[in-house]
Image (spheres, rainbow, N blue to C red):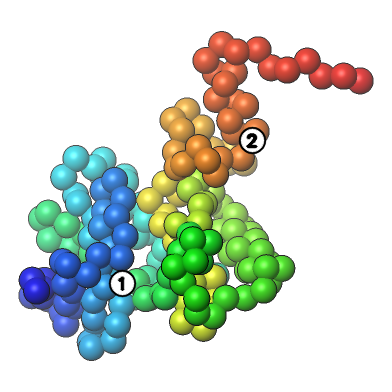
Amino acid sequence: MEFYESPESTMRFSRENILGRGAFACVFGGTLNEVPVAVKRIQLHDLEDEIKSREENILKSISHENVLKIVHIEENEDFKFLVLELCEATLHDYIRRRYVGDMPPDPNALHQMASGLSHIHSLGFVHRNIKPENVLISQTGVLKIADFGFCKPFRKTNSFSMSIPRGNRMYCAPEYLQLQKFAYGERPPATSG
């Protein structure tokens, strides 16, 4: 098994223990000071400077029980390493019946997700990529919103850019999909009343 060991700290992870993958990042199971953690390794090449630090800065500014916690940050010339609290599974794993551990009842799960999103919005951010794969389940059954790579601040006009679609179309708000259609020349449906 091939391990990555940090020259700067006691962070360590196995490149074979993959917990998840994204366009510019891979998440591994690892340890920091011998405590189990998740290590998100973000590839720095081919990323705009704003995007390289966006997720780190947003996670450092959010403290809420329903938002994944950032524990430690390291960087070398190729990668940024976000060390995050380790969770048991994703909501997607639960839906697909690949996770059978602690899970709150549905009304409580919805309340937890809404509470996390409300807190994110109260700080002036919009997540832009909420989907079952980005809702994690902690060891105690608490839901945690994760993956802030597409997250952006609201503008002073309480708006944000929707010029480039982000996230997964399957989980986009219907009004967002309608705006995308109209941007490409389709006419809005006639309204009655």
> Residue drawn 10% across and 55% down?
77
Residue at 12% x, 54% y is: 78
Q: Position of residue 9 (x, y in %)?
A: 15, 79
Give the image location of residue 22, x and y in percent.
Answer: 31, 50
How many numbered marks appear? 2
Q: Looking at numbered disc 1 in the image, what kind of residue is underneath it?
A: Ala
Image quadrant for the C terminus? top right
Q: Provide residue 23's location: percent of width, then percent of height.
A: 29, 46
Disc number at residue 174? 2
Dot 1 falls on a residue whose secondary structure is strand
Outermost residue to the right: 193
As drawn, 125 above or below 143: above
For label 2, the SS is helix
* Location of residue 72 (image quadrant): bottom left
Q: Quadrant of the N terminus?
A: bottom left
**Residue at position x 18%, y 74% from top?**
13
Q: Amino acid at mark 2?
A: Pro
Reading the image, the residue beneath label 1 is 38
